[in-house]
Image: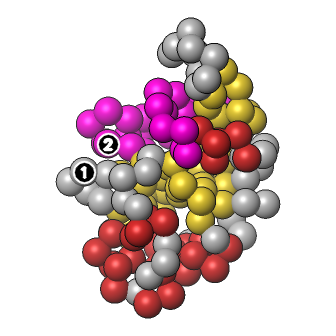
Amino acid sequence: MKYWLFKSEPSVWSWDDQVARGAAGEEWDGVRNYQARNFMREMAMGDRGFFYHSQSARAVVGVVEISAAAHPDSTTQDERWDCVDIRAVTPLAAPVTLAKIKTEPSLAEMALVRNSRLSVQPVTPEEWRRICAMGGIDPEI
């Protein structure tokens, strides 16, 4: 299993919006960055990801699961763009803010810290376990 992080502005698509989609989940569409698209092409069913509220909140707030592998993005006719579907798994007991992440030495090399603008990014197993612990959830969820 691989781990990922998906960023969204809460005013555009929030954790509550994601939860409301239920077991079917929702397309993670509209990504127009080649590196983020390529990461989505690497994803497999059952991979897990953090749901991150960007902008004012700047915090990991939940865990999602890949519910459909990469497929054409339905929001464009341009064949270059793919997306995956994700479904909500669980909220974090306590959101983990970017400020807290930046104070944790073991997370200094995390993509979120080094390249905060990328909307879809990989998370290492060690980063996954640490943020789950900080957020008060079992990393095996």
Examine the structure image and report whether residue 20 is included in the region drawn in magenta: yes
Question: Is residue 136 at all visible to an observer of this figure?
Answer: no
Amino acid found under the numbered disc labelled 2:
Glu
Please identify the residue farthest to the left as the structure is shown: 56
Q: Is residue 5 left or right of residue 124?
A: left
Amino acid found under the numbered disc labelled 1:
Gln
The x and y percentages for residue 43 are 72, 46
Residue, disc 2: 9
Asked which colour scheme the image uses, the reply is: secondary structure
> Label 1, label 2: how many angstroms apart (C-alpha)?
6 Å
Q: Give SS at disc 1.
A: loop
What's drawn in magenta, residue-wise? Answer: 8-36
Task: Decide which of tag 1 and tag 2 comes sooner along the chain.
Answer: 2
Q: Identify the residue at image location x=59%, y=65%.
A: 123
Residue, disc 1: 55
Q: Is residue 91 above or below residue 73?
A: below
Q: Identify the residue at image location x=39%, y=43%.
A: 8
